[in-house]
Image (cartoon, grey):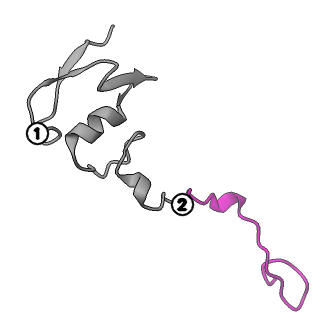
Amino acid sequence: MEAPDTMTAPPAAAASSSPLVAGRDFYFERGRFVLTEAYLLRRGTCCGNGCRHCPYRKASKPPAPPVDVARTELTSTSSTGRAGGF
């Protein structure tokens, strides 16, 4: 099924009710709807959803990557000389 060339903007997402234009305002990647930086700038504010092309989060520190607890190595040693204090 082919994606439509235009979509109407969600009511809270845009000040105007003009339709979104494929390629200019959004594109599809691996079945996901991705908004462009140009559209997000016209929108005027950050939605807080972590959009890939968000022009508003660049001024702040990016979030830290998640820690994989299963792969975290124990680095401290106890008096026994074993990792983890065993």
Q: Are marks 2 and 1 in contact (CB under 8 Å)?
A: no
- Is 14 inside the magenta-drawn segment? no
Which amino acid does the dot numbered 2 rest on?
Ala
- The residue segment tinted magenta is 65-86
Q: Nearer the viewer, residue 49 or 60?
A: 60
51 displayed left or right of 44: right
Which amino acid does the dot numbered 1 rest on?
Ala
Q: Secondary structure at mark 2?
A: loop
6 displayed left or right of 61: left
Q: Residues within 10 Å of mark 1 (few under 14, many from 20)?
A: few
The percent coordinates of residue 39 (x first, y second) are 27, 33
Q: Nearer the viewer, residue 23 or 30?
A: 23
Residue at figure coordinates x 37%, y 42% from the top left: 51
Residue 24's quadrant in the figure?
Answer: top left
Q: Secondary structure at mark 1?
A: loop
Residue 20's quadrant in the figure?
Answer: top left
> Which quarter of the rendering shows the N terminus?
top left
Residue, far right: 81
Q: Which residue is mark 2?
A: 64
Q: Which residue is mark 1?
A: 15
> Which quarter of the rendering shows the C terminus?
bottom right
In the rendered view, tell whether residue 8 sits above or below residue 71.
Answer: above
Residue at figure coordinates x 76%, y 66% from the top left: 73
The percent coordinates of residue 14 (x first, y second) are 15, 38
**How much space separates mark 2 and mark 1, taking CA atoms?**
32 Å
